[in-house]
Image (spheres, rainbow, N blue to C red):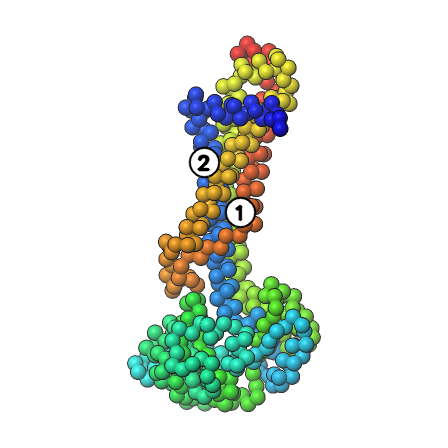
Amino acid sequence: MKIPTEVFISFRYLRARKNGFFSLLTTFIAIGGTMLGVAALIITLAVMSGFQTDIQNKILGVQSHIVVSRMDGNAFMHADEISQRVLENPQVVGASPFIYRQAIVRSLNTNESSGLLIKAIDYKTEDAMTDLSSLVVEQDMDFNDDLNGRRIILGQELAKSIGAFAGDEVVLMFPTDLASIPAMYKFSVAAVFYSGMYDMDSSFAFMDIGVAQDIFSMPDQVSGLGLRIKNVDDSLKLAAQIKETLGYPYSARAWIALNKNLFSALKLEKIMMFLILGLIIFVAAFNIISNLLLLSVQKFKEIGIMSAIGFSKMSIAKIFFYEGVFVGLIGAFLGVALGLGISLILKNFEIVKLPQGIYYVDKLPIAILYQDVFFVGLCAFIITIVAAIYPAYQVSKLDPIEAMRGQ
């Protein structure tokens, strides 16, 4: 395969930079700027995608894909009938009722207490909805045994804060119609779970829905239904279908809508980091422009000679354009390699630790999305190509006679 003359000469010009230190330095700066910009973008996007993926997996570990409830927030009856109507949709693979209630828990061992959010569930159906059983890190009994009765499952951080562990007894307190007299019930800690999300582990607990209906005076009532679907990515569309099927006064909300603020913030941060770090590539693009303009000054006489032996202005412009393309391609390739290398190191080795009390995770999550890598590399390459157009155009305007004279 014959290499075009313009490509061959531009490559020779790039290799010949070793004869001029200043020219070589500007070339390295242009390549290095593109490389660092691409690498920084890839690493940042991998971290942001990692946060989003990790938080999503942990949320779905303890939360249903779709939640059905009343629009006014009140409890409702006939949960079995509503479940049957929802399960008629082939995309819904399971339904489980639940009750939400705020309360205070106090350990009988230490007398320490803390506020918490109780989710009362049907253990037999809930374990098919979420990964609750896989999250248990400490238990007083087989999780698959009958958990009916006054037994409670506490988050790990919550259990630590009040000094209660599996097998210990705690008192659950919640307000009644008589504001000055809270209702109090003794519970046994059946297990302790760890979801990896500090907010949930420090303020969440599970109990049997039958017991909750009894102590909360909610006979045959539930706060809502949790649904599991085949494809979690279809949750928004399916939630709209279920809401239309059930009609007023019921609503159906997807898990991503229930955590809209969190994921919107993550998405916005990802976009802003892309724009901010993308400026590094633009700076590198200006380095490429200055590098090619410097080369055109150094090769002024050679440009006149090439014009004299028959090179057209377009051919001469192509030589300098291709050199800019080479610089951009090398920088983008090295940046992708460096970014992927550092991302893989951070993913496989826990180099960076995060404080659980501040972040939702305790270690730096990395998720390498190859579409992001391709997009960053492509954008960097396009920017450098655009940067090479102006110097090439300026070279094509040089007067060959003046170039031959060396003026």
Figure quadrant of residue 94: bottom right
Residue at x-position 32% and y-position 84%: 108
* Identity of the residue drawn at 56% across and 32% down: 325
| Residue 314, image quadrant | top right
Above or below for 215 versus 96: below
Check contact, mark 1 vs mark 2: CB within 8 A: no
Label 1 vs 2, first from the N-terminus: 2
Residue depicted at x 38% and y 56%? 350
Q: Given the current orientation, which residue lies at the most extreme top position?
A: 405
Q: Residue furthest left?
A: 110
Residue labelled with disc 1: 373
Residue 32 is tagged as 2
User: Would residue 284 be visible to someone looking at this image?
Assistant: no
Taking 186 as reference, is 354 above or below it?
above
Q: Mark 1 against mark 2, which lies toward the viewer?
A: 1
Label 1 sits on what residue type? Answer: Val
Residue 224 drawn at (x, y percent): 57, 79
How far separated are the C-alphas under marks 1 and 2? 18 Å
The front one of 73 and 65 is: 65
Q: Would residue 315 be visible to someone looking at this image? A: yes
Task: Tell me residue 114's x, y (percent).
Answer: 38, 77
Label 2, secondary structure: give it. helix
Is 284 situated left or right of 401 in this image? left
Which amino acid, mark 2?
Gly
Q: Secondary structure at mark 1?
A: helix
From the viewer's perspective, tell me whether residue 42 is left or right of residue 109. Answer: right
Image location (x, y in percent) of residue 373: 53, 47
